[in-house]
Amino acid sequence: MKAYDEPLSNDSTNPTFHEIAACVMEKRRALLKGAVGSALLALFAPWTNAATARGTAAALPGAPQRVSNTSTLLAPFGPSIPTHSEDRVTVMPGFKIRAILPWGDPLTHPNAHFKPDGSNTAAEQAQQIGDNHDGMHLFPFPGKSDEGLLALNHEYTNLEYLYPADFLPQATLSEEKANKAIAAHGVSIIHLRRGPNGWDKVPESRYHRRITGATPCALTGPAAGHPLLQTQDDPSGRLVLGTLNNCAHGVTPWGTYLTCEENFNGYFGNGNPNDPMHKRYGIANGFGYRWHEAIPRFDVARTPNEPNRFGWVVEIDPFDPESTPKKRTALGRFKHENAAVTLAKDGRVVVYMGDDERFEYLYKFVSRKPFDPTNPEANRDLLDDGDLFVAEFTSNDTGNGRLLGRWHLLSRANPKIASDPRFPTDAEVLIFTRAAADVAGATKMDRPEWIAIHPTSGEVFVTLTNNSKRQADAVDAANPRAPNFWGQIVRWQEAGNDAAATEFAWDFFVIAGNPAVYPETDPRAGSINVTRENMFNSPDGLAFDRMGRLWIQTDGNYSNRGEFAGQGNNQMLVADPNTGEIRRFLVGPSGCEITGITFSPDGRTMFINIQHPGEAEGHPRAPGFPAEMLNTVLNQQPTLFSDWPHSQFPEITGGRPRSATLVIEREDGAPIFGAA
């Protein structure tokens, strides 16, 4: 996601993850002063083996030696590749890459071709692949490994590249320009097939579909129809136009796609500074899109309930092009990153979710009814009925080296919430989930982003990407540094290994840092599984392959200087969760984020996304330009920072940088991992 420097919206007195982490770190320091090695390892007693413990301990004086190359999971991969700041993708030897599906390629109409000067109309953009690719999933056709439907999110758009060189930020925004940006958001459903030349779109498939910021979506579940969701254009409170800021995703056991609305607040203007819920959700004057100047529904002064209709998880049936996307209100309203889905021991559906903003929370939803694999229709509305919980992390030792966490119920069945007059019904709890989580006593986190579930152990991993706003008096066990420039990955195991449990045990998997700048004895160097060869910052995207390897994607600072010297462009790494070993697999082009990951069923192909190549914020060359003029300069000279993918794949039209999907395969054609 794009890291917006928004004012802090969580002023609750809840403990921060940083405070809890400080307690843990202090315990570790005390142990290190005493019976150094064995005591430290006891505190990190693994749920796998001692090598994991060595791989998760923070870099402190006297810590065990760094992780050695002992991983059998990583045996098919070479050593970490170098970082760089160039406008190209590099990948480990033995692998090949190809870029497909760039922003602006025709999708639902064969003649809606991309125009290199940015002059495509709003109507054309609505027929093209959207911008800034993010989460995605390949849904194979039954029994096939070489054909399927790719559901692909489009998080936001860079206005400096979206519009032709006549765009001036200070000029009046036309309705046409606003509608073009709206059409660049949402989701693409793309019919793919692997042919003699590799993977590509199937021409004029009936499955091709664009879902944009103007596509009708149904509001379902306990909050649907509530007065706070009603508007003049939709007095029913059950039909909203569009889905926005579609970040990461999830996949249900019944074969539907979950797309997550993240920074929805940035599209609305004229928020009320005296409205506590506007403040809690950051609804003010947006991120510069200015749609409210041209389209009334984005002007909060005119349509005060419209922002309440965004910030949901949206369920889409990719195989039914006529189906209506459904915003599932039972999963709560906040800035959703992704939705990691699993089953509890009794078959109920569990969805883990993070709220990606500084000092926000981790959530999970547990359905009321179980999943029925024999009756697909019975599962269609499982996400409309269930319980929503929020996480509290503590520094209390569980007795086996892990630390205790709890899930707090978010409903009026929780006495704390029932006593708060802001929540007369559970519908208000779901519409204002953040405020209910404040009351419940959740732990304030360092931007919880992607969540991934180990395919066999059930362990849950979450990226806490960074938090430059955290102060030294606000540290806790899971957020151990202030400020936190580099981020960390936390993992937990539910009590009884049951995803529906209300308690869990947690620990770190890795604390990112920069050992090229700080000595290994400094916590800013990162945990002991971070080295000069594999260092990174801001872990974001996260996924397991079916062999149990953890793939880590970054969306952080690519300035390659100061705190981030030597770390280069954003990257993707592969890790062994058992040994803690991490290797850099791929490095992206100039100014990009690496995000989105999915696999073909036969294990031969991995798909990932290159988002916003050439983005100005934090770019190594950006300091040469006045900040207030930078986007105007790039609008006039769009290839100044990047012309990727054209610069590396000339068959893709250039003229400006374009997000695209990378196809990654082994050069020898063998599977990257075992087939299903």
Image (cartoon, rainbow, N blue to C red):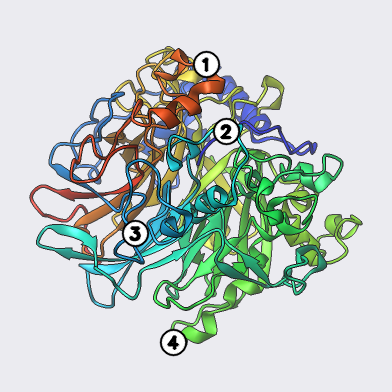
Nearer the observer, 580 or 300: 300
Label drawn at residue 374 = 4
Q: Earlier in the sequence, mark 4 or mark 3?
A: 3
Q: CA distance from mark 1 to mark 2?
A: 15 Å
Query: What x and y, as percent, mark residue 63?
Result: 44, 21
Q: What residue type is disc 2 on?
A: Pro
Q: Amino acid at mark 4?
A: Thr
Q: Residue at x 75, y 65 (%)?
A: 229
The CA span between labels 4 and 2 is 55 Å
Q: Are marks 4 and 3 in contact (CB under 8 Å)?
A: no
Q: Which residue has dot 2 on it? A: 169
Whether residue 549 is visible here, answered yes or no, is: no
- 1 or 2: tag closer to the N-terminus: 2
Viewer-side residue, 225 vs 45:
225
Q: Nearer the viewer, residue 89 or 370?
A: 89
Q: Position of residue 328 (x, y in %)?
A: 62, 68
Give the residue at mark 3: 112
Front: mark 4 or 2: 2
Question: Which of the two marks, 1 or 2, is nearer to us in this view?
Answer: 2
Disc 2 element: loop
